[in-house]
Image: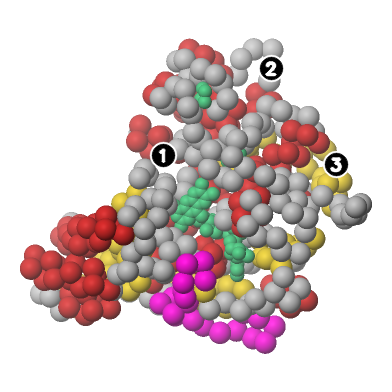
Amino acid sequence: MKPAPFVYERAGSVEEALAMLQRYEGDARLLAGGQSLVPLLNMRLLMPSAVIDVNDVPGLDEIREEGDEVAIGALTRYSRIEWSPTLVSRLPLLTETVRYVGDRQVRTRGTLGGSLAHADPTGEMPLAAIALGATVVVQSQAGRRAVPAEEFFLGPYYTVLEPEEMVVEVRFPVRRTVSAIAEHARRHGDFAVISVAAVGEPNGDGGWKSVRVALGGVADTPILAVEASALLSGTSLEPDVVARAGEMALAAADPPTDVRASADYRRHLIPIYVRRTLELLQTRRSEGAR
Amino acid sequence: MTETIETVRVSVKVNGEEAVRDVEPRRQLVDFLRHDLGLTGTHVGCEQGVCGMCTVLFDGEPIKSCLMLAPQADGHEITTVESLNGEELHPLQRAFKEHHGLQCGYCTPAMLMTALALGRRGVPLDREQLEEELAGVLCRCTGYQKIYDAVESYLAETAGSGGTA
Ligand SMILES: Cc1cc2nc3c(=O)[nH]c(=O)nc-3n(C[C@H](O)[C@H](O)[C@H](O)COP(=O)(O)OP(=O)(O)OC[C@H]3O[C@@H](n4cnc5c(N)ncnc54)[C@H](O)[C@@H]3O)c2cc1C
Ligand code: FES
Ligand code: FES
């Protein structure tokens, strides 16, 4: 399968890319890692009149520590995230989660910004962004806006991005937290059937000041399990509390049936994976890791 | 209907040699290598990033060349399986031969290129990590174990030589 013809544009800066997006009035696509866009072009599921390559935009792939935040450029590749010493120490959930994305070849090319913009409901980077309370920085010729990750995704492959906007960076708050992820996939590297990520802030007495639980693959977008998170915060993750949190997460989910699993099977997995993730969180804390 | 599609000049270093061609932007890198440059060692399978047959090295790192447009390679370096050509078998090829790491051979160019990049990266890997690193290339014949054996022995061999073999 070969793509339909299109005009190839190479942007040398964010401003240039934004001007091109404006000029094509919604009929152009940004090309980042190409790991989702190019298959869609090859299968002719997308036939844009232009493809705007942003791979040569300088400075769009930086990882910067700024006070109590880490800012990661939209074009930062998965492999950079996987191997970044800064992220291993500051945002270990990201380096752990990115290993679940595709295979080595996909991680050589795929980018953080492309993953968020593509908005696969099972995507690991969208899940981690929500669990960590990240902010997506979006830019158009009119200026910049900052969108909380929880509000960025509107549906499968659908976000708040306007056609003339692009993701420029993602900002992650850095606190003294413990984090964990558990994922069910048909084989390692496949798209997730479901995935659960948790980020907890320990308090002095062995309990947890706050816990955030997010789930992927269980709804139209990755979701923050708001009620379950509220219930878990301030507890010591006692087994009965964890079980109730699993039921709440299940109630908040609306899983799809697709080629990878039925909705029923996904429902069956939700409480199990919530429990596994929280147990892992607890273990890591007692090991003093992360 | 004759539609004129604008072409883009692509100038790329493939296996150390400069190549310049004018291509349609929609040309996939794998077709550029096979059809425009005649380097048919790189195979094609799914054309949607799933099978890994088209794996080549892009500036030294493994990528699926069906997921890259030829114009994106402009100014970059591509390494294909043809780079292993020589009077004698390359140590990596020898490892595949000795460990029976291939049957029909369809996946072999991609396995070789993925393994070559691993050797150059030079990070020690246990068997499970090795399996994950190679998971981007499917093999329908061998059951993988002998491929892992071959790559394991190659990596052990290159570890001593700083990954230059
Ligand atoms: C074999 C295979 C396995 C995979 N497995 C997984 C997996 O397990 N988990 C997972 O999460 N993903 C998986 N993926 C998808 C992969 O993560 C993609 O890299 C990702 O979805 C898109 O990122 P990209 O940089 O490649 O973007 P592209 O493919 O270049 O672009 C994707 C979309 O985002 C838009 N876009 C890109 N950058 C921006 C930007 N800065 N601002 C606005 N819009 C932008 C593009 O226009 C396009 O519409 C897999 C892909 C393959 C081929
Ligand atoms: S041909 Fe299957 S991954 Fe490229
Ligand atoms: S040897 Fe036949 S596909 Fe791998």
Some atom of ligand 2 lies within 8 Å of the CB belonging to the residue at label 3? no
Q: What segment is highlighted magenta in the picture?
A: A139-158
Q: What is the crowding at mark 3: few (fewer than 14 residues within 10 Å), some, or many (at least 20)?
A: few
> Is A42 left or right of A104, judged from the image as shown?
right
Q: Residue at x 47, y 62 (%)?
A: A120
Farthest residue to the front: give it: B1
The residues tagged by marks 2 and 3 sit, at their Cα atoms, a distance apart of: 24 Å
Vertical arrangement, residue A91 with respect to residue B157, above or below: below
> Is A195 left or right of B52, judged from the image as shown?
left
Instruction: Read off the residue under disc 3.
Output: B20
The dominant secondary structure in magenta is: strand
Q: Earlier in the sequence, mark 2 or mark 3?
A: 3
Closer to us: mark 1 or mark 2?
A: 1
The reply to whether residue A152 is visible in this rendering is yes
Q: On residue B86, which mark appears?
A: 2
Mark 1 is on which residue type?
Answer: Glu
Q: Residue B151 in the image: x percent, y percent?
A: 46, 26
Mark 3 is on which residue type?
Answer: Val
Q: Residue B129 in the image: x percent, y percent?
A: 38, 38
Q: What is the crowding at mark 1: few (fewer than 14 residues within 10 Å), some, or many (at least 20)?
A: some
Q: Quadrant of residue B59?
A: top right
Q: Earlier in the sequence, mark 1 or mark 2?
A: 2
Q: Residue B3 in the image: x percent, y percent?
A: 89, 54
Mark 3 in CB contact with mark 1 (< 8 angstroms)? no
Instruction: Read off the residue under disc 1.
Output: B132
> Is B118 left or right of A40, judged from the image as shown?
left
Number of marks drawn: 3
> Which of A267 and B164 lies nearest the eye of the viewer?
A267
Q: Secondary structure at mark 2?
A: loop
